[in-house]
Amino acid sequence: MAPAVRVCFVCLGNICRSPTAEGVFRHLVAEAGLTSAFEIDSAGTAGYHSGEPPDHRARAAGQRVGIPVGGRARQFVAADFARFDHVIAMDAANATDLRRIAPSQEASGKIRLLRSFDPAAAANAPIPDPYYGKEQGFDDVLELCRTACRHLLEEIRKERRP
């Protein structure tokens, strides 16, 4: 059996976008019957929410469509590059922060923007941060994550075929 594919979604505080993407990706992987083939996590580039659950609005958006958004916030650290095969940033600022702590070119090469997997998205399109907006922003983020995560899963499955 092939080793698990390890994916970490990263935003700023790890309470809105990255736990939403993690929940969506877990859901898609489970629907595909591939749970044992993946290790999925999320983290933030900053640690000021460490230990907190996802924002209640992110959890509610997931609940409305039957996707659990859970976990506890943690900060992404340089050692995480060795742990994960794919480091998926929510926006360009997150990607820049990740590149700043990447210990090597190989590690930096693991960083991609989530929306880069969505063929309909513009180049460098972000998953917008809904934190200071209204609840609808969390629903919008969830839908953007669903689209991009479907394409991410397809790409990984193509890479893993013998």
Image (cartoon, rainbow, N blue to C red):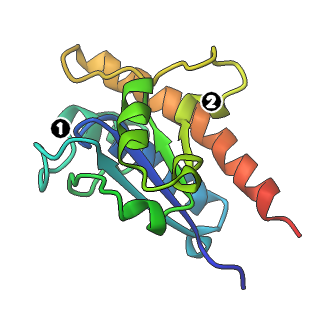
Query: Residue 35, how many percent across, how many down?
Result: 56, 69
Residue positioned most to the bottom = 1
Dividing the picture into quadrants, the one containing residue 54 is top left
Query: Residue 111, how many percent across, how many down?
Result: 53, 44
Q: Are marks 2 and 1 in contact (CB under 8 Å)?
A: no
Residue 82 seen in the current view: yes
Distance from label 2 to label 1 (Cα)?
27 Å
Q: Is residue 93 left or right of residue 122?
A: left
Residue 20 seen in the current view: no
Q: Residue at x 72, y 85 (%)?
A: 1
Q: Residues within 10 Å of mark 2 (few under 14, many from 20)?
A: many
Dividing the picture into quadrants, the one containing residue 90 is top left
Identify the mark nearer the N-term, 2 or 1: 1
Q: Which mark is residue 43?
A: none
Q: Residue at x 33, y 42 (%)?
A: 63
Query: Residue 53, how many percent across, how many down?
Result: 17, 50
Q: Which mark is residue 116?
A: 2
For mark 2, give the secondary structure: helix
Q: Amino acid at mark 1?
A: His
Q: Which residue lies under the disc numbered 1?
A: 56
Query: Residue 33, how many percent across, how many down?
Result: 65, 67
